[in-house]
Amino acid sequence: MKRGENMLTIAIIGAAGKMGSRITDNLSRGDYSLLLCEKGDAGISRIRERGFSNTETKRAVPSSDVIIMAVPDAKIGGIFGGKHITRPMIGRPPIAVKRQCLCLF
């Protein structure tokens, strides 16, 4: 996609972790608007050290076209209000999220 108003917005939840960092590196080379999400101070610091900014998940999810969840299995339920998600969901919105979602386990 070309830069501008038609740019795809992608939220990466867990952007400072092992998998999230790799995904961020790869997508940052493309023409995407990235919203990087981390909750803890250490993760937020890692995002900032790499020259990016952190976006709160509750702000990023509603404004994203695609949501990538690069978080451990044990954390998935906490992100979706205690609901347990047991398998990757591709192209099907999870609980209360009306967007494309890709869960990476």
Image (spheres, grey):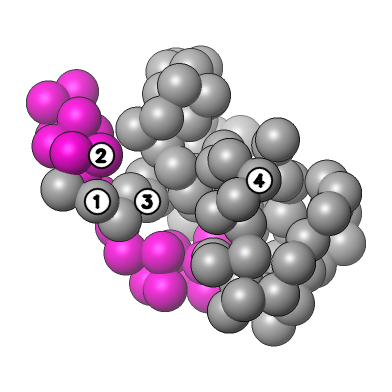
Amino acid identity at mark 3: Cys
Task: Give the crowd class for mark 3: few <14, some 14-19, many >=20 residues within 10 Å.
Answer: many
Q: Which residues are magenta?
A: 42-64
Task: Give the crowd class for mark 2: few <14, some 14-19, many >=20 residues within 10 Å.
Answer: some
Amino acid identity at mark 2: Gly
Check contact, mark 1 vs mark 4: CB within 8 A.
no
Tell me which numbered mark, 3 or 4, is placed earlier along the sequence.
3
Residue identifier under label 1: 40
- The percent coordinates of residue 60 (x first, y second) are 43, 64
Check contact, mark 3 vs mark 4: CB within 8 A.
no
Examine the rendered structure and indicate whether residue 53 appears above or below residue 56.
Answer: above
Residue 37 tag number = 3
- The percent coordinates of residue 9 (x first, y second) are 52, 51
- The percent coordinates of residue 70 (x first, y second) are 57, 38
Quarter assignment of residue 45 = top left
Examine the rendered structure and indicate whether residue 91 appears above or below residue 93.
Answer: above
* Quarter of the image with the C terminus in it: top right
Quarter assignment of residue 72 = top right
Give the side of residue 7 with respect to residue 68, left or right. left
Front position in the image: 53 or 88: 88
Residue identifier under label 2: 43
Judge whether residue 102 is colored magenta.
Answer: no
